Image (tube, grey):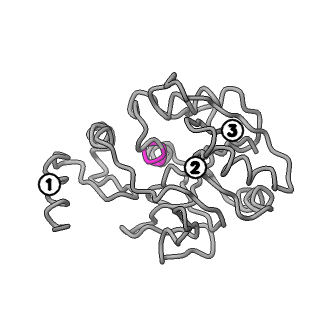
Amino acid sequence: MSIICVYNNKEILNEYLLKSLNKQTEKYELILVDNQKNRFKSAASALNFGAKQAHGEYFVFAHQDIYFSDENWIKNTTVQLNNLNNIGIVGVAGKTVDSLVRSNIKQGLNPVDVSPFKITKAENASTLDECLFIIPREIYNKYNLNEETCDDWHLYAVDYVYNMKNQGFKAYIIPTTLEHRSKGASMSESYYTTLPKLQKKYFKRGLIRTCMGDWFTFIPVSIQKYVKKFKNY
């Protein structure tokens, strides 16, 4: 496996991702992309830069604040991946055919379950979260992360899921044990500038599923955003 991570906080990187990787029982290749000086303007461009240096059979794109609480994570995950068919992309949190987020991972400074909806085996995914996802090298070499559609720090895994489905490959969520320091609720305004690009790109699908909500492709994002905000009052 090649672990590829773009980071902007070395303290968090050392305390979480690197500390937990040092405990892994299997060998791995580590590719770190330093963005402390904002060299890269998007996750896709930074991760593509890192992936060009990778040689593993599977590329694992991980946030800097991922913590592998299972010392056999690489070993166990590789076994799961080798038993899946027609892989396009694999994630650790996402949705299946409904609007419920499903995952076995934990999040936050005092880790709690991301979702009460667990999985016991790999499930077909309709969307995936960006905190950690895996792409086989042979697939990635044909289909890089899209820097034009996702020119900021959001929705690049979502875009990849839909692209893989269009290309005839599958997206999966796998049961796994790990922790994500972030609460997973970061949505800057750039999230809403990327969404319209996905709407246009996948218009015929009618619906774009994300872990932060589902979005119709035929209704302006501004209207849907207002309705969602109104419902939360």
Quadrant of the image occupied by residue 59: top right
Give the image location of residue 29, x and y in percent.
78, 39
Magenta span covers which residues?
157-161
Give the image location of residue 68, x and y in percent.
70, 58
Q: Tag 2: residue type?
A: Ile
Q: Are marks 2 and 3 in contact (CB under 8 Å)?
A: no
The CA distance from mark 1 to mark 3 is 40 Å
Q: Tag 1: residue type?
A: Tyr
The CA distance from mark 1 to mark 2 is 32 Å
Q: Tag 3: residue type?
A: Arg
Which label's residue is closer to the chain start, 2 or 3? Answer: 2
Q: Residue at x 34, y 48 (%)?
A: 187
Assign a secondary structure to mark 2: strand
Residue named by callout 2: 89
| In the image, farthest residue toward the top | 39
Assign a secondary structure to mark 1: helix
Residue named by callout 1: 226
Which label sits on residue 193? Answer: none
